[in-house]
């Protein structure tokens, strides 16, 4: 069974630009969560989607948004990029929402210059 | 807000020594999960603890969930170089997975 895939793996943007990251969950998984990982703040929850609906949202500004498609693939968008948005963005999928283990993708390394 | 504190931040051990990382929450958890992230890799699920006082073992790894479901620990016996990485606990406060709060992690290095 293929794992969680994320594209692109690396991205360099400049301040003010916007970016879209993509995540394809494991086949059959309907829940997709997004996390931001930085050395200082660790792993921080961005949002979770289940059956195309946002179930939960972390404490991030409105510049961070996401969506999920009917095939469970998910995208997250960051508008008006700031230097502090440089991070590893991880997507994780699980069978359902609730108490399930999460399977993480390799992440997208975003650098904002 | 809800927060999961994890200590220590770093641990350097000689191969063969034991290692323990601790997580603590100020409020009761529904369950707690543990993940391992190798250098340059992504977090990989290790285990989930749900019941009060639960103890689970995976070979040299022992996971405990406190009686009050507010703390947890991961103990590795006789560390090996393959144990190198960052160990994260992630507390679930109930309901959806969206309430999964990660600790800052403990970075383990093992000297051969």
Image (cartoon, rainbow, N blue to C red):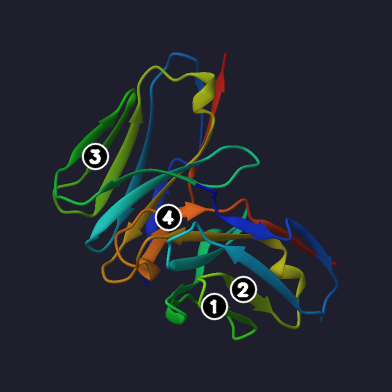
- Specify which label sits upstream in the sequence, 1 or 4: 1
Disc 1 to disc 4: CB gap under 8 Å: no
Q: Tell me the crowding category of disc 1: few under 14, some 14 to 19, or many 20 or more residues within 10 angstroms, Cα based.
A: few
Disc 2 versus disc 3: distance between alpha carbons? 36 Å
Query: In the image, is residue A100 above or below residue B64?
Result: below
Measuring from the top left, give residue A112's x and y in whole percent: 80, 67
The subunit letter for the residue under badge 3 reads: B
- Specify which label sits upstream in the sequence, 1 or 2: 1
Q: Tell me the crowding category of disc 2: few under 14, some 14 to 19, or many 20 or more residues within 10 angstroms, Cα based.
A: many
Residue A69, numbered circle? 1
What element does badge 1 sit on?
loop
**Which residue carries the number 4 mark?**
A102
Of marks 2 and 3, the one in the foreground: 2
Disc 1 to disc 2: CB gap under 8 Å: yes
Disc 2 versus disc 4: distance between alpha carbons? 17 Å
Residue A75, numbered circle? 2
Q: Residue at x 36, y 66 (%)?
A: B97
Q: Residue at x 86, y 72 (%)?
A: A14
**Which residue carries the number 3 mark?**
B64
Disc 1 versus disc 4: distance between alpha carbons? 19 Å
What element does badge 2 sit on?
strand
Q: Tell me the crowding category of disc 4: few under 14, some 14 to 19, or many 20 or more residues within 10 angstroms, Cα based.
A: many
Disc 4 versus disc 3: distance between alpha carbons? 20 Å
């Amino acid at each position: 069974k293929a794992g969680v895939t994320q594209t692109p793996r690396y991205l360099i943007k400049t301040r003010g630009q916007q970016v879209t990251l993509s995540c394809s969950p494991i086949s059959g998984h309907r829940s997709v969560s997004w996390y931001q990982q930085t050395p200082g703040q660790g792993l921080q929850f961005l949002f979770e989607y289940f059956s195309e609906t946002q179930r939960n949202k972390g404490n991030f500004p409105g510049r961070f948004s996401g969506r999920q498609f009917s095939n469970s693939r998910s995208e997250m968008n960051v508008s008006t990029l700031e230097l502090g948005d440089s991070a590893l963005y991880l997507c994780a999928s699980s069978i359902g929402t609730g108490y399930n283990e999460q399977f993480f993708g390799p992440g997208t390394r975003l650098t904002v210059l | 807000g809800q927060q999961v504190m994890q200590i220590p931040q770093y641990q350097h051990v000689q191969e063969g020594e034991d290692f323990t990382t601790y997580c603590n929450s100020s409020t009761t958890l529904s369950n707690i999960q543990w993940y391992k992230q190798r250098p340059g890799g992504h977090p990989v699920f290790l285990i989930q603890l749900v019941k009060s006082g639960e103890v689970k073992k995976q070979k040299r790894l022992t996971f405990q969930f406190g009686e009050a479901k507010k703390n947890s620990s991961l103990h590795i016996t006789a560390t090996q170089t393959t144990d190198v990485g960052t160990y994260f606990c992630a507390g679930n406060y109930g309901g959806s997975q969206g309430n999964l709060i990660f600790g800052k992690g403990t970075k383990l290095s093992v000297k051969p």
